[in-house]
Image (cartoon, rainbow, N blue to C red):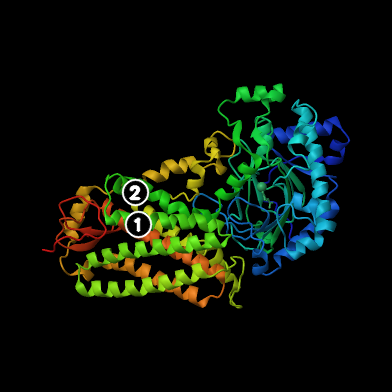
Amino acid sequence: MPGATFPPFPHDVPTQPLVIVDYALVKAGDQAEIDVLWKAATEKGFWYMKNHGVEDLLDPMFEMGQETMDLSIQAKMEYWQGNSGGSFGYKAKGATTVDLSGSKDNAEMINVSKDDALAYPRVAHASYPSTVNARMENTVRPFVEACTDANNTIMAVFNAKLGLPEGTLASLHARDEPSVSEARVIKVPATPGSTKIAVGAHTDFGSLSFLANRLGGLQVLLPGQDDWRYPLPGHVICNVGDALNLFSGGILMSSIHRVLPPPLAQSHFDRWSLVFFTRPGNSVHLKALTELSPLIAQKVAETPDKMHDAGVNAAQWFARRQSKWRVDNQKYYDYVLTFGDELKHIWGRGRFSIGSILFVLARYLGFASCVLSNFEKSLSISNTLTCLRVTAIISSEAIVAVRTWAVWARNKWILAILVLCAIAACTAAGVTTVNDVQSSERKSSSTFEYPAPYPILIFDLRTSVGGQWVVPLSMTIMYEVGKHRTPIVATHLLSSLSDPCVQLSGSHNCPYDYPDYVVAKTTLPLSQPKSRASSRYALERRYVPSHPPCDLRWGVIYFALMLALGVVNTALVIRSTAAVIQQNVTQLQTSLHSILSTRIVLHLANSGVGVKQMHTATSSYDPDDIQFSTVLRTTDIELSTYDVGPRP
Ligand SMILES: O=C(O)CCC(=O)C(=O)O
Ligand SMILES: [Fe+2]
């Protein structure tokens, strides 16, 4: 790729007119050039840069990136950056969502920490693939040094223009203070003809970004514009990030950008880009520097509606923003959507039955295992996880079994089959658990042993199905869209409820990064109960006594789905020797059980019928409302998962 010739950038796409700043002149103190830079940084936050001194290091960096991406997926995933807010290491494509409907990104990248590059061979934060290490001293470190120099020079210019005491911005970006500053190489594989977003709309988290790319695809949305426009590829582009925007009280502009596949003929080629991000020291508090500059104080006073204090330091800010769009973190989504129903039907009743205890176990042990699976680093966590998962699955199975028995009108053969299945399942689960917990070795989650011909397929399993989100999320979307015809906003709400970034909603110039507050408002009320009258009506219309299969097709499909998933998952666990697949599949199994069983309980509760006085049981399907409910004939509104009462 370095030195390769690509088709030219097309003439007929909307381009973003940006000025070219001559870095050599800025460094030499040329006032006219400094004014050009200042205007670009305060009005657009983006500019092209020439004579920056990094020219000769671009190709070697791209080569390092290519050598790294050419490694097998197994080798790259040894350096997986995780989902907990870390950034150093490898990010596979598809690990983040790029828009509010949950589409996944199409960019893989390797991030090398500035601190690691400078400290090499000492490890400051993380280790890297051999392809990075081999070039750490002769390529990565010089690149990091040159970009840091360039960004520091620019920051010194901003420091003076903002009227800050000399060295203020430099001290917030001290070379020796640990930071999340990093060099990044990004590969977007060729997707001819596709217009799918490869890197979602965002503002950069840090202070200054230094970006080189080989093909078009970057698009910038400047303040006041309503269309995305391409900067020209082949230039080095610099842009201001959110930290400088905050420090300066909003005087320096941090603009929204994203990456699409390269346009037209260029779309037949892989797109490579290279970024160096200068970010503040980890402990630096992110707020406007009002006490140090009258100019900043005045700007803050003029814009009281904007957020001027993030209330967190740079490391916390970064971790939150980094994890928010992670696909894996959306496994909590269903819990959030149904929380309102849970409050009402489980906690609001003021008393507990065996049914509601099973509900709580299925739901919260499933949820806890979801959360804990992010931190599966030690044997004790691994063992705790095994126990949580098994208990959640058994509780879910109990709920589903009792419901199944109910919809089959307490048929004794069904009961016998269920009891046999339960004994078999519990025995298997018990043996596996004891075996797992007694084993003194934790199975490494970074050990990949893929069947040779299908590495990518299995890898996708690792990142999507294995990441425990895809099936629960699709099911949830199916339910909720069908039920309310409301666009689904997929997000990581739970972490953001305690996130100060939530306060930024609508007040910062990057609305794309802070959607969560809105989400909280739009999703929580989604699960409104059906009106009692309509469910009664549905019940009367559809009630078919003592002949379950006829009107039970949706219920049967629902239970069959759970069974089929169980079989598929078990097969995967048995077939695969890769610990990571076994663990992810088990977690997926737990999440699914938890979601399906608690959905059953809540839908039953929402259908407005209880079980205490019912005469028999059936299932209804209302075409206007994709909701499966086990509808039970009753006069009393009561929630229970197992008490089927007397038959007629
Ligand atoms: O690849 C590009 O051109 C831009 C990448 C970018 O915006 C980022 O990594 O923050
Ligand atoms: Fe960016």
Instruction: State the residue at coordinates (75%, 39%).
Output: 173
Between 340 and 294, the one nearer to me in the picture: 340
Q: Residues within 10 Å of mark 2 (few under 14, many from 20)?
A: many
Residue that numbered label 2 is attached to? 342
Residue 13 visible in the displayed image: no
Residue 582 visible in the displayed image: yes
Whether residue 343 sits left or right of residue 156 in the image: it is left
Quarter the C terminus occupies = bottom left
Residue 429 appears at what percent x and percent y?
A: 41, 70
Instruction: State the residue at coordinates (15%, 52%).
Output: 635
Which type of secondary structure does the marked residue at label 2 adopt?
helix
Q: Residues within 10 Å of mark 1 (few under 14, many from 20)?
A: many
Please name the amino acid that badge 1 sits on.
Thr
- Cα separation, mark 1 vs mark 2, equals 9 Å
Residue 425 appears at what percent x and percent y?
A: 37, 72
Residue that numbered label 1 is attached to? 598
Q: Is residue 377 above or below residue 169?
A: below
Between 535 and 417, the one nearer to me in the picture: 417
